[in-house]
Image: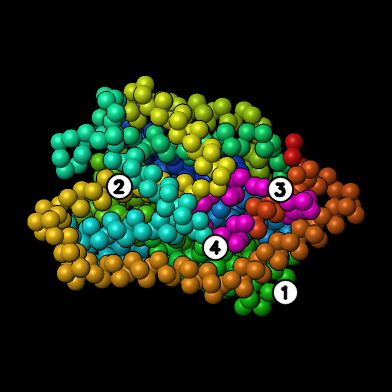
Amino acid sequence: MLENLAIGFATSFTPDNLLWCFIGVLLGTVIGMLPGLGATTGVAIMIPLTLTMEPVTALIMLAGIYYGCQYGGTIAAVLIATPGDANAVATVVDGYALARKGQAGKALAIAAIGSFIAAIVSLLILCLIATPIAALTVTFGPVEMLAIMIMGLLTIISFAGQNLARGLIMAGLGIFLSTVGMSAGFASSRFTFGSIDLLAGIDFVVVMIGVFAIGEVVSQIGQGNVKPIRVRMKDTVIRGKDVKQSLPAIGRGTIFGFLLGCLPGAGSTLGSLVSYSAESQISKNRKNFGKGAIEGVAAAESANNAAANANFIPTLTLGVPGGSTTAVLLGAFVMYGIQPGPLLFENQPSLVWGLLTSFFIGNVILLCLNLPLAPVFAQVLRLNYSYLYPIILFFSVIGAYAVANDVFALTVVFIAGVAGFFVKKFNYPTAPLILGLVLGPMFERYLVQTSAFAFGDLTVIIRSPIAVVILLATAALMLVPRLVRRFTARGKEHVEENIMATSEELRTSSDEDGSSAVVENADEPQLVLAEQARESDASDKTTVNNPRSEPDGQGVGESRRE
């Protein structure tokens, strides 16, 4: 491992890679703070802008955006009770309660420290086990790779959450769109309807930009801005006592997050919620959970970041995305002509280890940025979104054209944007669509190869011991998240009770002191949190971004909509 790390640091410590790593984590933090964007959208928007970069540099920047968004979502969760991403849902309960007590800086600081510790520990484990897994899978033939593709496609069950039928519909649509154009095994066109533009197929990056970026912007228009709680630089200085009090929660959160993050399709939301639920039941300070327990913030954030790193284990070693954002990153690998999977560690060690070691560098940069710049980041939340959204649309259109270098791509991106708006409006998960688009061609290729290898007898897949083990492991991986959700249902109910209790307490206190922090739309954040706590689905981000109102008009986020 030391030799591989030396190769990686030699790659990631070049001036260009250091610069783009810094830019990536900074952009990720800002993107993660803005409600409605998040890591998946941020990465999708930036992919086209990396076309002229070296693949390793581009991936370092995109990965920086990914884990930068993890902390950015925390800032919004603590200051405005509206998580920038689904991953920060559990942080809202105690993070915003601390902010209302004038301890926002303390919450942000412990989140940064917990995130850093969890990230470093999980990265060390990732570096230890990634090579053995890759070495094991490097001997796989087309039959075994077909079994892995089946595993990847079945992660749709995890991405779909409780809306399995809707998830299957979206995945089926993605697989169908991936078949448009020339056949992988035969020299024939499919579903082109006589259009020359469709012969090359539908570029999944263009579809991603339309669904995630344009669809998100359209769905957010009219939502308005939020007024965050102020943070002063001196507030981010915390006592050693607070860190010591949080260390057990950080340790447990790291374990929960890493184990659940290793599951294909599990993402990091599940790990964050499970960690918070468990901590709220076993912590010595559990009576203060929901009222501003620092352990609640530490447990949620450490699990969130550990799971985000663990998501790269199935992505890099098997070519199966660990979450919705790594599904988009998987598409970026393919666009750069890189095939994630067993051969990646053998054929391109400088790329994969350069990427992994950049995580260490990026997390150090994040820690150095987040503590002193928390007050500055808080001001970003005061930006007028009416200026921000046109910029996002502009880069989305330019990016779509740059990817395909064809005017037809503009038609596709706008159609995908309109479709993305309705997909979010009717609460359909978007990650299965991208999963189908990315894995569809690979599944078809290995299916054709397996069929040719076995002379059309596809039962060969159940005669291969390795393939059978993979399929059994797939079945187990599909069951584990559901069993975890069932056994932690009590903990999730505790999260919801805390959300409701905190909502009522904060609303009452606001009524008594005449605080300006009461929201005209106070029901919105509460519904967001309640829905996310119930569903705990990392990929179905639309529930965070598309809240529905309740008749009682009460909520955690007593922030003024402007």
Image quarter hosting the N terminus: bottom left
Residue at x-position 36% and y-position 59%:
154
Say if mark 3 contacts mark 4, CB within 8 Å: no
Q: Which of 67 and 142 is in front in this view?
A: 142
Alpha carbons under labels 3 and 2: distance apart: 37 Å
Q: Does the magenta stretch include residue 552?
A: yes
Residue at image coords 42%, 59%: 157
Instruction: Give the extent of the magenta segment.
Output: 531-559
What residue is pinned by disc 3? 549
Which numbered dot is residue 440? 2
Q: Nearer the viewer, residue 350 or 325?
A: 325
Amino acid type of the residue that numbered disc 2 sits on in the rendered structure:
Gly
Residue 292 visible in the shown view: no
Q: Where is residue 9 in the image (x, y as percent from the top left)?
A: 33, 52
Q: Which residue carries the number 1 mark?
A: 287
Q: What residue type is labelled 4?
A: Ser
Q: Nearer the viewer, mark 1 or mark 2?
A: 2
